[in-house]
Image (cartoon, grey):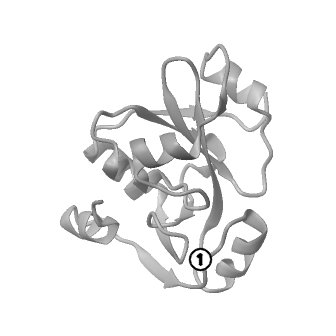
């Protein structure tokens, strides 16, 4: 598994890091916002009959799967299995992170990003749920682009 910090430093991408106890839910992650500045992000590992997706949402927003499905023009979205998550992104349940694309050698996963996150400072796990990285939206997109991964934007309201 590739080291997130090493890659960010290699590409001179600025970030801040906070270490903490393991978190497994959005509710548990609220305490992290007192350690590091940024908008908490909810990351969902989804799939349809062709692609895998990491859907990145503001952790305060709820967007129904059907609405996401319509916006990305997918026929039927469902959650990926723990086995698929590990095989494709090298991640375990509770540690879903867009930084997992470092391990996606076949570019099977497309990132889907809520538009309201554009221009903000974002909080993500660095592929483990015992630390959080704060990164600007622009630097995050730079990281995604340098990893040769596709991304799409979606609205939180239709």
- Badge 1 marks a residue whose secondary structure is loop
- Residue at screen point 31% across, 71% down: 5
Q: Quadrant of the C terminus?
A: top right
Using the image, determine if residue 128 lies above or below residue 158: below
Q: Is residue 17 above or below residue 74?
A: below
Query: Mark 1: few, some, or many residues within 10 Å (few <14, many ≥20)?
Result: some
Residue 42: quadrant of the picture: bottom right
- Residue 64 x %, y %: 80, 34
**Farthest left residue?**
10
Q: Which residue is mark 1?
A: 37
* Percent coordinates x, y for residue 76 in the rendering: 67, 18
Q: Which residue appears at 48% of the width and 71% of the height?
A: 133
Q: Is residue 38 left or right of residue 147?
A: right
Q: Residue at image x 65%, y 64%? A: 40
The relative height of residue 118 versus residue 154 in the rendered view (above or below) is below
Q: Toward the viewer: 31 or 14?
A: 31
* x and y percentages locating residue 27 in the rendered image: 78, 69
Q: Is residue 110 left or right of residue 42?
A: left
């Amino acid at each position: 598994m590739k080291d997130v910090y090493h890659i960010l430093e290699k590409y001179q991408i600025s970030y801040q890091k906070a270490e903490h106890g393991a978190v497994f839910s959005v509710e548990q992650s609220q305490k992290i916002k007192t350690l590091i500045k940024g908008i908490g992000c909810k990351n969902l590992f989804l799939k349809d009959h062709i692609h895998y997706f990491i859907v990145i949402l503001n952790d305060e927003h709820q967007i129904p799967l059907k609405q996401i499905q319509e916006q990305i023009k997918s026929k039927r979205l469902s959650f990926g299995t723990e086995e698929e998550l590990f095989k494709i992104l090298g991640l375990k349940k509770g540690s879903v992170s867009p930084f997992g694309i470092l391990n996606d050698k076949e570019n099977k996963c497309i990132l889907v990003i809520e538009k309201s996150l554009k221009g903000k400072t974002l909080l993500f796990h660095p592929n483990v749920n015992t630390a959080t990285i704060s990164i600007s939206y622009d630097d995050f997109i730079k990281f995604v682009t340098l990893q040769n991964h596709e991304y799409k934007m979606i609205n939180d309201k239709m």
